[in-house]
Amino acid sequence: MTDTDLPLIRHWIDGALRDSSSGRTSPVFDPARGVVAKRVVLADRSDVDAAVASAAAAFPDWSETSLARRQTILFRFRELLNERKGELAAIITSEHGKVLSDAGGEIARGLEVVELATGFPHLIKGDHSENVSTGVDVYSIKQPLGVVGIISPFNFPAMVPLWFFPVAIAAGNTVVLKPSEKDPSASIWMAELWKEAGLPDGVFTVLQGDKVAVDGLLTAPEVRSISFVGSTPIAQYIYETAAKHGKRVQALGGAKNHMLVLPDADLDLVADSAVNAGFGSAGERCMAVSVVLAVEPIADALIEKLTERIGTLRIGDGLRNPDMGPLITGEHRDKVAGYIDLAIADGASVVVDGRGIDVDGDEAGFWLGPTLIDNVPTTSRVYTEEIFGPVLSVVRVASYEAGVELINSGRFGNGTAIFTNDGGAARRFQHEVQVGMIGVNVPIPVPVAYYSFGGWKQSLFGSAKAYGIQGFDFFTQEKAITSRWLDPSHGGINLGFPQN
């Protein structure tokens, strides 16, 4: 099959699919087969301008659309997404490689934010103080920003966009989404679902592309804010460039998440949790546990339990219901596998080597099995860098204090967890650790939708977290009005209920 015979994934502009004027495309792989299954168009500047212009043209009407009408569309989108989530899960698995159950879980967490957004009238209402001075009232109102840009990563092609665009749209903004070029189809599927739900054309736009599209959104004057999730170097670039161009920025960066295991912990629970959190989605999660800090003398027993559980995992094509699927590209697989060689060179012990494993899938797929490495030096790049793959490191520490010191000395502060049966230790940990999201006997502490998601240090640039109350604050701007009226007014008689 030639490139011209492959399905072509296009932009979504003005409520319809649109070709690119650039003539450039990028391959979209089936990771379980190791072949190019589709191609996606890559935007040039004229495509960026068209996408932004469409969103800007749609903003005045959408921002003036009644809350009741917006809410009706959001409820309809939620119902359609819930009814047809199996379709979306299959698309995610085919392009990302994660197993169907994991893709379904991603959608479920995104649905939480949609459900939060359906209650937006309560979350964007202002305050009112009567008679602050004689005959004077002060009140506030919240209004949308305008056109907002979202740049999402490959590891969660549905969930991460769903962290942002339901909130932005509910608040009255119009959205230009730039998905990852590695798995772009989920965004087009959601765009079509919005149209079916009754969203006006131009309110939700999908701009396919690479750095050209990203830089176009970062510099376009009409784009008022940027929301981003990805690696720390890119997050820093996004934040600095967008802020320099006068935009609000949510820039969530990378992570190196630790699980601190105290000697009193239930090691069976710890082993199950570490395997789930370390190898789910092939480790391609910013909230994956990649380092287990084992407070001695439990490390040997924990290593044994981890090894037993890893040995039961079935690796294969995500459509065949295995435990873990492939990595997203061959290039990324090779990069992750290189850390195993690096660990050996640095004196660590590879307990389970995920290279060259038997898989339930095509041999050409981008496979790397769960890998367990013991005695990882804290000076090694295996410890200090975000690997973003199925590599779990064990670092032995002498005490609770030594473990917390290691966590706090790192440059990331995204997520962490403590496993213990000591309530006092858990309470002390949540107070002392310098990390934004903390689990107590919970390995992946992603907050539910009515809280907000975001880390500390180099895991978050700027102060704006995703979804929750902070999400609505980010996508609105507040006005404070001081008012005095000398005479009452009368609007006439109307005995019916107003509608829409």
Image (cartoon, rainbow, N blue to C red):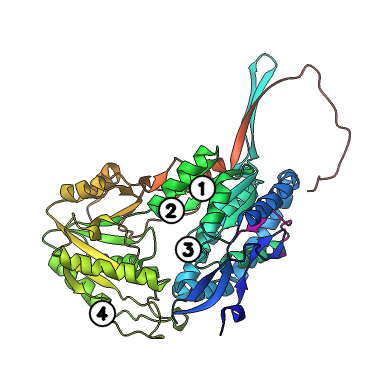
Asked if the residue at tag 2 contacts the one at tag 1, i.e. Cβ–Cβ closer than 8 Å, the answer is yes
The residues bearing labels 1 and 4 have C-alpha atoms spaced at a distance of: 39 Å
Tell me, for residue 311, which label it has, or none.
4
Q: Amino acid at mark 3?
A: Phe
Mark 3 or 1, nearer chain start: 3
Q: Which badge, 3 or 2, is on the more N-terminal residue?
A: 3
Along the line of sight, the residue nearer the viewer: 413 or 344: 344
Residue 284 shown left or right of residue 16 in the figure: left
Asked whether residue 198 is drawn in magenta, I would say: yes
Mark 4 or 3, which is nearer the eye?
Answer: 3
Q: Is residue 199 left or right of residue 142?
A: right
Q: Nearer the viewer, mark 2 or mark 4?
A: 4
Give the camera-side residue of 96 and 89: 96
Q: In the rendered structure, which disc, 4 or 3, sits on the residue that comes first in sequence?
A: 3
What residue is pinned by disc 1?
468
What's the distance in space between the residues labelled 3 and 1, CA to CA? 19 Å
